[in-house]
Image (cartoon, rainbow, N blue to C red):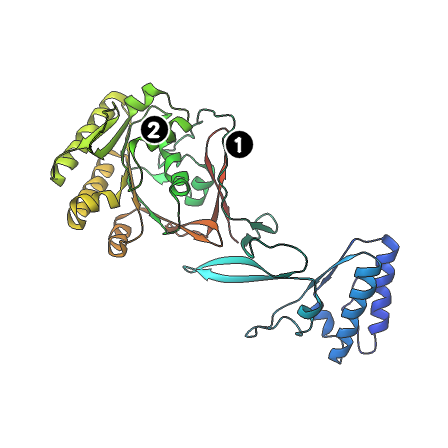
Amino acid sequence: LDLMTAKEGAVSTTLEMIISEVSRIEAKRLVIDSFSALAQAFRETYEARIILHTILSRITKILGCTTILIVEVPYGEERVGLGIEEFVADGIILLKRSRLDGRILRDLEILKMRGMPTPETQLVLTLKGGFKAFPPFKVKVIEKPCRFEPRPDTKKFFSTGSQDLDEMLGGGYPRGSLVLIEIGEQIATLQYHLISAITAYNFTTQGRGVILIPSSGVDHNLIRKKAEEGGLTEDEINRLLRVYIRKYPGFKPEPFVVTLEGESITEYVMSCFNAEYELMKETGQPVLRIVGADTLIDTYGVKEALSALRACAMRARETESLCIILLKPGYPRVAKILSAMADVHLRITREHGSVLVYGVKPRTNLHVLEMDVSKGYPIPKLTPII
């Protein structure tokens, strides 16, 4: 119904038109978009109150038609619309747009929902493909495990292993590049592994080697478990993976584990280079390195760790391989230095329970990260916030 022509004294006509149409088609939903614009057609505020009262008493209650009023918040003000709608409504949902690190963030806030529990009152939303609100990140169970299906690379890019992430980055990770993944303080291991492990799957399932220096809180047993989730066999794990850990009491040697026993960063770098050389010699293909920067910093100190990471970046460029650095919270100065070195810089953070991923280099919109297990293995599902 076009009600924009309503003028002074047209309250009764407007109401009759609405009620007549709702009754005629036995409507279950009435949407007035926008009530703020409609209210401007009336000279006095009390006329808008009459509309509201009639909608509530006759349309909503008697005719059993749920009514949705679209009301706009004037710029620079906090009140909703005319300031009367929120007092009579059964539910109030506030849609907002703000900025997160210079990028658009849309969120939905439930201010009021009479008679209904609201365990989550704020949700991230997007207009991509329609109106969609995201619940907090949910871990999903893999019911029918399958082997990871690798995505093909191009002449310029290694695929990240994820179609969504490839599209977000404009093709994937450049060959011979250094990738920095900066992890927020509220991000769980499983969540950032969705971004990093998928690339390791894409390398190993194509017969390529992967060298890992795990971040704090991650050991070789967890890495083995993640590899098995991707469908890797024991032979592939032992042949293609090299996981560096510090030796500890009770450690049981594994074919894919390399222990760090020396105190010198030079020994570590040379050991990695040797492992890389052997893997490249055996497979005839480039190698992926995934390095937990916090592990190197805790072991060797900031200065030596940065030296090793620079060597990793140089080696990746020389061999046209790939080096991914995982940086956990607590090292703001290191983050700036590594960001300057990196060809690709991703950040993972959390807002209203949703995990958000975005590119600093290249610059991208915020993307909501969800866990997809529909193919029998964990895949990152990324939806842009627009």
Q: Residues within 10 Å of mark 1 (few under 14, many from 20)?
A: some
Q: Amino acid at mark 2?
A: Arg
Image coordinates for residue 123, horizontal then vertical, percent? 54, 54
Quick one: 70 or 207, which is closer to the camera?
A: 70
Residue with the most extreme top position: 235
**Tag 2, which secondary structure?**
helix
Residue 310 visible somewhere in the drawing: no
Query: Looking at this view, is 325 or 237 the one in front?
Result: 237
Residue 252 to residue 349: above or below? above
Residue 269 place in picture, x, y as percent: 16, 37
Residue type, mark 1 in image: Ser
Check the image and report above or below for 373 versus 84: above
Q: Is residue 170 left or right of residue 91?
A: left
Q: Which residue sits at x=48%, y=39%?
A: 139
| Figure quadrant of residue 110 | bottom right
User: Where, by quadrant of the figure, is residue 72 drawn?
Assistant: bottom right
Using a 10 Å C-alpha cutoff, classify the residue at mark 2 as few (fewer than 14 neighbours), some (14 to 19) or many (20 or more). some
Where residue 315 is drawn, which disc sits there?
none
Q: Is residue 35 left or right of residue 348?
A: right
Answer with left or right where residue 143 lies relative to residue 160. right
**Label of residue 374 in the image:** 1
CA gap, disc 1 and disc 2: 22 Å
Instruction: Judge whether 374 appears above or below 14 on screen.
Output: above
Q: Which residue is mark 2?
A: 224
User: Of the residues under marks 1 and 2, which one precedes in the sequence?
Assistant: 2
Where is the N terminus found, in terms of image quarters?
bottom right
